[in-house]
Image (spheres, grey):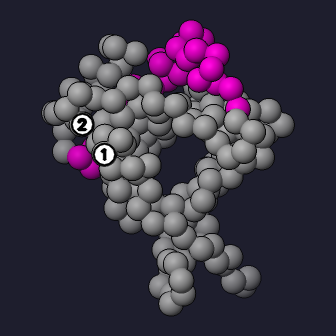
Amino acid sequence: MTDFCARVGRLVDENPAEAVPAKVAKLMPTLLADPTFLAPEQMSAPEKGYARHELYLCPDDRFTVLAVVWPAGITSPIHDHNTWCAFGVYDGVVAETRYRPIDGTCDRPLAEPVSVRAWKMGEAGALPLGSGDIHGMHNPGSRASVSIHVYGGNIEKTGPNVGRVYKVVEPALA
């Protein structure tokens, strides 16, 4: 973990913010392949919702590393982010649906699905900064899954890195 965090720190220092998420995602497969990376308690599923375990908080607030435990069938809200994000699957499968915003006037912003991908163990991806970062994640499996997330900034100071929560509008059938 120490080497991974040092490498992420260098990427943050040496690259423009818009390039960092994809570069961090390229570092993640080695970390995801280490069967001793997480302690058993960092992989246990909660009774309700999903669990977030802080693994590393950069001392100068440049990034945070979390483990997220997804019980079978659990789904996150559809959301965007305040900072950059890279993620990878440590155990199981985590499905991600990406969305695009739709103009609308209601109690919360609207979005419609544009793609779905099932991320498998060892795979990592990133969300771009800005308008392409609306997504939702869920565990489609019958057992808990675990993902590792690297966020720009200090989540203890900024909160859970969720900018807005969206209401989903299914696309019209042609």
Residue contact between numbered discs 2 and 1, judged by CB atoms under 8 Å: yes
The image quadrant of residue 123 is top right
Q: Which mark is residue 44?
A: none
From this viewpoint, which residue is outermost toward the right?
142
Which quadrant would the N terminus be assigned to in this image?
A: top left
Magenta residues (range): 17-45
Answer whether residue 41 is magenta in the image. Answer: yes
Q: Amino acid type of disc 2? A: Asp
Residue 74 image point, x, y percent = 72, 48
SS for callout 2:
loop
Residue 87 image point, x, y percent = 48, 38
Question: Which residue is labeled 1 in the image?
Answer: 157
Q: How would you classify the magenta stretch by its main secondary structure?
A: helix
Residue in the image at 80% along x and 32% along y: 143
Question: Which residue is labeled 2 in the image?
Answer: 61
Question: How many residues crowd mark 2 within 10 Å: few (<14), some (14–19), many (20+)?
Answer: some
Q: How far is the residue under mark 2 from the one under mark 1? A: 9 Å
Q: Amino acid type of disc 1? A: Lys
Residue in the image at 33% along x and 50% along y: 158
Answer whether residue 132 is magenta in the image. Answer: no
